[in-house]
Image (tube, grey):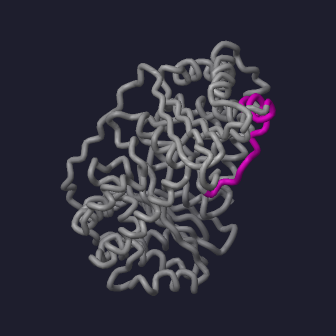
Amino acid sequence: MTDLLTQIRLSNGLLIQLKEIHTAPIISQWVWYRVGSRNEIPGKTGISHWVEHMQFKGTPTFPARILDKAITREGGFWNAFTYLDWTTFFETMPSEKIDLALRLEADRMFNSRYDPEEVESERTVIISEREGSENEPLFRLSEAVQTASFDLHPYRHEVIGEKQDLLNISREDLYQHYQDNYHPGNAVIALAGDFNTKSMLVRLEEIYADFPAATITNNFQINQEIPLTEERQVEITGPGQTTFLSLAYRSPAASHPDFFAYTVLDSLLTGPSSLNMFGGGISNKTSRLYRALVEGEFAISVYGSLPATIDPYLYNINITVHPHQIPQAVLQIVETEISRLQDVPVSMDEIQRAVKQTRALFAYGSENITNQAFWLGYAEMFDHYEWFQTFVERVEAVTPADIQRVARAYLTPNQRVVGTYLPTGNGKDSE
């Protein structure tokens, strides 16, 4: 039986995506909000992530102390995530228990408490999280590279925010951000699983139809980034024994046609990147940089990352340098392999192998009901669900000329940031 897919938009702007899947008696609900670190201004970085935390502090109907117990007692699990372009909350429950999740998410869309004591308690938690990350070489290097990669766009900030901002954000700031962004007109509700579409639509309309459409009070403008014209370098020193190298090249928005050729290029160069946080892993041992760097004993590990984003973002290549090598030698190997992609057309056999790996990783990240519900909403955050539906055929259509063109357009030294973490040899090593 073909899965039944339905999409409707209520008069208050709420987009509802439903996909019947009768393979198991479970339902997964994801509520997505079009707000993340992309929608933050200097002085209030990290506010979206903090609001996500506050959404677990309860409402008059669902006090915090009963929320987790209520979900787990009914055999479900839940979580939430904040990223560059979005914030999302989800529950996966036995089918007959899903109404609890429906009511919970609707209630905290409008009725979350922002108790001043809870705000201060969570400030301590988030600053501790930030300080813990600052002890990790890879976080410090990643943050430095990300900041250096953008001059204007909010993508330059880490999702967790700047420490000084976390010290200064007020309860009123948090509550205003919540009211401005967590409303039906800025939300997508995605459900997949064992339900009847007609009955589920009736129930969702009962719950949400009377919710008002919010009046947008903020006039936030995204400053679009200008192209890099020369290489930028950042160097971080700190405790440990391990040297890390991070290269950041500009990448297109996920909706851009080049993104699909870039995806295959990533698979060729470093191994396929998972777009789904619940996706399985695939070995990258056949990738060009693994063979050149790891097998050549220039690096301990290498991996790439090509996130799907609204605006042009970054393709990152992260390398753990071999103890007996220096970053400059590793960088030279990377440049040699990129030059090969730019100068010598890739064979169709190699492309087909890379596409096969990309397709397999994509399948692993799409196979269960939680993942199916994830994709219903996730694709809407940077494009539309059709993006997900056509992903495989679009990567299968990539040609050697596409790979060569994208490599020449994006992977040039004057359009990258090179970040190096140099260990001092003191303290505990972190990898």
On screen, residue 181 versus residue 79, left or right, reads: left
Q: What residue is shown at x 57% (from left), y 49% (from top)?
A: 239
The answer to which of 59 and 51 lies nearer the viewer is: 51
- The answer to whether residue 334 is visible is yes
Query: Outermost residue, top direction?
Result: 343
Q: Quadrant of residue 20?
A: bottom right
* Vertical side of 345 occupied by 235: above or below: below
The answer to which of 262 and 314 lies nearer the viewer is: 314
* Vertical side of 168 occupied by 421: above or below: above
Q: What residue is shown at x 53% (from left), y 28% (from top)?
A: 258
Q: What residue is shown at x 28% (from left), y 48% (from top)?
A: 41
Residue 283 lies in the magenta stretch: yes
Which residues make up the magenta segment? 278-296
The answer to which of 103 and 1 lies nearer the viewer is: 103
Q: Number of marks in the image?
A: 0
Q: Position of residue 125 (x, y in %)?
A: 42, 69
Q: Quadrant of the N terminus?
A: bottom right
Q: What residue is shown at x 30% (from left), y 59% (from top)?
A: 181
Q: Position of residue 54 (x, y in %)?
A: 37, 71
Main SS, magenta region, reads loop
Q: Quadrant of residue 330?
A: top right
- The answer to whether residue 11 is visible is no
Residue 70 lies in the magenta stretch: no
Q: Position of residue 389 (x, y in %)?
A: 58, 45
* Vertical side of 365 occupied by 317: above or below: above
